[in-house]
Amino acid sequence: MIGSGIFMLPAALAAFGGISIVGWLCASLGAVLLAVVFGYLGKLAPDANGGPFAYTKLGMGDFSAYLVAWGYWVSIWCANAAITVSAVGYLTVFFPVLGESALAAIATGLAIIWFFTWINSKEIKTVALVQIITTIFKLAPIVLIGIWGMFYLQLENFTPFNLTGESDLSVITTTTVLTFFAFLGMESATIPSGSVQDAASTVKKATIFGTIATVFIYIISSVSIMGIIPAEVLAQSSAPFADVAEIFWGGAAKYIVAAGAVLATMGALNGWILMQGAIPMSAAQAGLFPKTFGKVNKSHSPIYGIVISSFIVSIFMLFNYSNSLVETFSYMMQLTTLAVTIPFLFSITSFVIILKKSHSRYYQKLTVAICAFAFVVWIMVGCGSEVLISGLSLFLLGIPFYFWITREKAE
């Protein structure tokens, strides 16, 4: 979860004003509801590899499972493009030319994507080591700035509360959509659950407690940055955490925090490139994606799926680099969020279906599922018509492939 979103969101939210904090709270509540649903699913089906895909297959069958795998895969393309843009944004602290030359920024972004594609061609232990190291480095600046900044808040930076002139409900919806992007990944512990020791307990705890901890970290750090840097300045920043560090501790701190942010975004990209191979592989093993995606190399990495996905991510990044870093990141965030809402809706529906077989606290769990479903629908509506059309077009593009794959399998 903790990757590019939190490092770029303060700048993306600055144009809305203090009301964006309400968006954070709404997104946090929705993320916790979804985490509880996925935690329950992890306990109900502990041996199901593939997360949302596997749960949907159990509850709703092959066609729905394919749609989930496709939608989730599309969301990963968009997310990885957004994460790469964020990484380049923080690298501009060290290499200002990246903020001045689109060609240099694109070349750097492509190099980052393909470096981590290479890392993910190695054994899972190598991927995990990179993830552990980057997690340690990324948490330090976020927590430090979040807690330290609470003592230096300037309340006037939160006024006027709504800077847009639009209705409060409209702005809360938009900021909830943007901030919810930062929670995508709360379900990722469920994806390799078939390989996790004591999965029924471990996956549920990792999903729920991991999300709650992330809520705390996100809100204190975001409030701190918005309370320290005026909105008009923050909106133009490509590295808000680094800018706050410079205010507190001088120029050297700016570079230290920027380095932590770069490591964080790269760690997120490393983890999501792992996912962009794992989801298609699970679908291929179930006969719902081409067999190529199920093939592994000598390190047991689904290398074909990873490489094909990285080509698509590279294209997405190229097409969206005509705008500023913040504008590009905001659009890719919304597109990613929309793409993942459909797998979430199918997963929640499958949860209700699977839940019927378990009578333990049925109505309590059903209430959580209904609330989570309503939240996801709200997020879909809040994405706006342009993103909705783009996202649904990408989603529907996958349907012909399903019939082609099933026909090939029948023959």
Image (cartoon, rainbow, N blue to C red):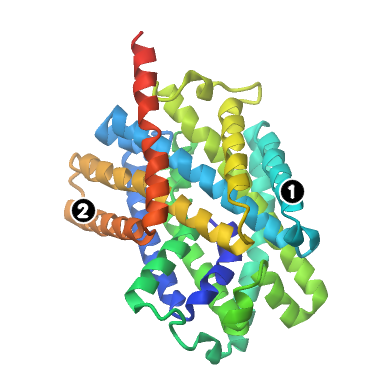
State the quadrant of the C terminus. top left
Q: Nearer the viewer, residue 127 or 372?
A: 372
**Res 108 label:** 1
Determine the image quadrant of residue 21.
Answer: bottom left
Per the image, the residue denoted by label 2 is: 366
Q: Which of 111 and 21 is in front in this view?
A: 111
**Residue 175 versus residue 290 in the image, above or below:** below
Horizontal and vertical percent for residue 108? 74, 48
Residue sitting at 76 percent across and 51 percent down?
104
* Mark 1 or 2: the one toward you: 1
Horizontal and vertical percent for residue 395? 39, 40
Horizontal and vertical percent for residue 151? 61, 87
User: Which amino acid, by three-letter code, is at mark 1?
Assistant: Thr
- In the rendered image, the residue lying farthest to the top is 411
Q: Which of 236 and 83 is in front in this view?
A: 236
Name the secondary structure under disc 1.
helix
Q: Is residue 376 visible?
A: yes
Name the secondary structure under disc 2.
helix
Residue sitting at 36 percent across and 55 percent down?
34
Q: Can residue 201 be seen in this view?
A: no
User: Which amino acid, by three-letter code, is at mark 2?
Assistant: Leu
Dot 1 or dot 2: first in sequence order is: 1
Residue sitting at 63 percent across and 42 percent down?
128
**Residue 15 versus residue 266 in the image, above or below:** below
